[in-house]
């Protein structure tokens, strides 16, 4: 069975940056299950996995445009430090805003904190080693929800 729109695929992956540093990996964990064609993964991954089957191993080089996007300076904001209610704020901390956006602290000054709503991997070239470990049909529930259920999925 090949990976096409609305198949469920499970992959093992290792993600490296341009210098070869490992940024993320599924090794030693359960594989990543996703619903193909439902924007569960970045576009560069879905395009590279289209038509593949169980046992396939591939390398994917993904530019920011097909990955986590270009860094948008408009998504960087300074907020008063008092907005954090007195807790200790450090660079690298992440917060969810009232509208569900995740922001990362990039700078802490005495009176203000700089937060960045860009994805931490924005502007990065991404290099994936991927192995397809399973391909199956999606269930009607999975299609209705737009994500995978059961092992490695939601619920
Ligand atoms: Zn669901």
Image (cartoon, rainbow, N blue to C red):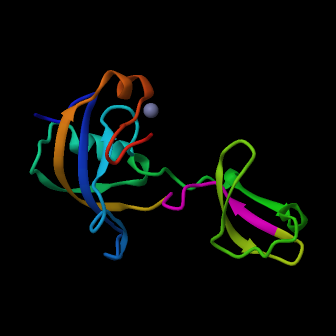
Q: Quadrant of ligand 1?
A: top left
Q: Which residue: 22% across, 43% down? A: 49
Image quadrant in which the C terminus is located:
top left
Vertical placement of residue 135 versus 30, above or below: above
Residue located 29% across and 26% down the image:
139
Q: Residue 25: percent from the left, percent from the top?
A: 33, 65
- Magenta extent: 113-122
Query: Foreground residue, 118 or 90?
Result: 90
Specify whether residue 119 is painted magenta: yes
Quadrant of the snapshot with the N terminus? top left
Q: Nearer the viewer, residue 6 or 79?
A: 6
Q: Is residue 24 left or right of residue 122?
A: left
Based on the displayed image, in which of its 4 quarters is residue 13 positioned? bottom left
In x, y percent, where is residue 55?
9, 51
Asked whether residue 16 is drawn in magenta, I would say no
Magenta: main secondary structure equals: loop
Q: Is residue 58 shown left or right of residue 75?
A: left
**Quarter of the rendering containing residue 88:** bottom right
| 98 up-or-down from 22: above or below | above
């Amino acid at each position: 069975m090949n990976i096409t729109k609305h198949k469920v695929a499970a992959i093992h992956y290792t993600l490296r940056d341009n210098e070869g540093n490992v940024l993320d990996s599924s090794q030693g964990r359960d594989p990543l299950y996703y619903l193909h064609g439902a924007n569960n993964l970045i576009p560069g991954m879905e395009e590279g996995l289209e038509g593949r089957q169980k046992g396939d191993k591939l390398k994917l080089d993904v530019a920011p445009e097909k990955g986590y996007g270009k860094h948008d300076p408009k998504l960087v904001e300074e907020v008063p430090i008092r907005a954090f209610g007195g807790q200790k704020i450090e660079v690298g901390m992440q917060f969810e805003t009232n509208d569900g956006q995740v922001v990362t602290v990039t700078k802490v000054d005495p009176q203000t904190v700089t937060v960045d709503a860009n994805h931490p991997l924005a502007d990065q070239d991404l290099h994936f080693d991927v192995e397809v470990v399973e391909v199956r049909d999606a269930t009607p529930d999975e299609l209705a929800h737009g994500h995978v259920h059961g092992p490695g999925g939601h619920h």
